[in-house]
């Protein structure tokens, strides 16, 4: 009987030690709403906004979303903004005309961004108040973006989730902080995953729909 009791105590001890060794995801806080009060008209102005807002992972994620929105409006300038908002790990040296100061998106990052070429509405789904029903029309600024900081992704990176009106679940983006304290997008392929098709209302006879 004593031997059985001893084995039971030892089993509990081993179980406790095993649990202590398991590294669970680190909960880093709840949701935040980031406000973008306007869309910059120049890249220099965008960088100034980035330097103000991207001092937190949430702000950096909002800046990244803003860059993708700009890409749908002005592909050349928007690409520059996405390059600026992307971790250097995913950039490649380039002399192409579309590059920014000698750097362009690498193949993987470029593939993700190009998903918006045929689905320009995807970035707008991250703005509060948009929906498939209203064609993801954001209206006038300010834009509000809801972000949930969820886990420590390791190596100093933070994984957060951006709420979208085009899907039932938020989209993850992993942020990494550079030496200047600016948070940039490191893994963001899910940001470009398709959302619900926007509902386009018929224009009637004026649009050839007789």
Image (cartoon, rainbow, N blue to C red):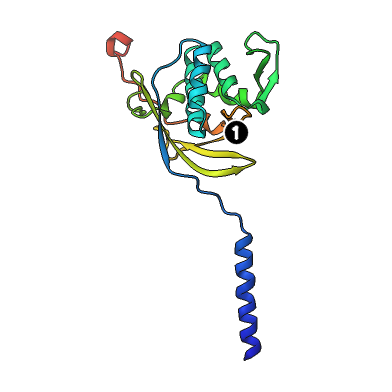
Direction from residue 4 to residue 204 in the image, left or right: left
| Quarter containing the C terminus | top left
**Residue 200 falls in image quadrant:** top left
| Quarter containing the N terminus | bottom right
Residue that carries the numbered disc 1 in the rendered image: 176
Direction from residue 124 to residue 16 in the image, left or right: right
- Residue that protrudes farthest toward the bottom in the picture: 1
Whether residue 168 appears in this view of the structure is no
**Is disc 1 placed on a helix, strand or loop?**
strand
**Residue 176 falls in image quadrant:** top right
**Residue 184 falls in image quadrant:** top right
10 Å neighbourhood of mark 1: few (<14), some, or many (≥20)? many
Nearer to us in this view, 12 or 73: 12
Write the residue at 38% across / 20% down.
Answer: 37
| Residue 126: image location, x then y, percent | 43, 29
| Residue 194: image location, x then y, percent | 49, 30
Numbered-mark total: 1
Nearer to us in this view, 34 or 64: 34
| Residue 180: image location, x then y, percent | 60, 27
Write the residue at 62% across / 11% down.
Answer: 98
Nearer to us in this view, 179 or 79: 179
Whether residue 112 appears in this view of the structure is yes
Vertical arrangement, residue 52 with respect to residue 149, above or below: above
- Residue that protrudes farthest toward the front in the picture: 180
| Residue 32: image location, x then y, percent | 41, 36
């Amino acid at each position: 009987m004593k031997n059985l009791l001893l084995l039971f105590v030892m089993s509990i001890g081993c179980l406790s030690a095993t649990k202590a060794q398991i590294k669970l995801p680190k909960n880093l806080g709840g949701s935040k709403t980031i406000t973008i009060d306007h869309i910059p008209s120049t890249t220099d102005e965008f960088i100034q906004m980035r330097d103000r807002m991207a001092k937190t992972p949430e702000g950096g994620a909002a800046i990244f979303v803003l860059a993708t929105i700009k890409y749908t409006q002005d592909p050349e300038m928007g690409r520059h903004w996405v390059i600026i908002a992307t971790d250097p790990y995913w950039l490649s040296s380039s002399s192409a005309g579309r590059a920014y100061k000698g750097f362009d998106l690498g193949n993987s990052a470029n593939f993700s961004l190009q998903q918006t070429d045929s689905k320009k509405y995807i970035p707008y789904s991250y703005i509060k108040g948009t929906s498939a029903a209203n064609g993801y029309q954001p209206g006038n600024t300010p834009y509000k973006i809801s972000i949930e900081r969820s886990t420590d992704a390791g190596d100093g990176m933070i994984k957060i989730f951006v709420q979208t009106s085009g899907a039932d679940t938020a989209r993850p983006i992993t942020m990494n902080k550079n030496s200047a304290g600016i948070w940039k997008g490191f893994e963001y392929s899910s940001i470009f995953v398709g959302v619900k098709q926007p509902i386009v209302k018929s224009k009637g006879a004026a649009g050839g729909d007789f």
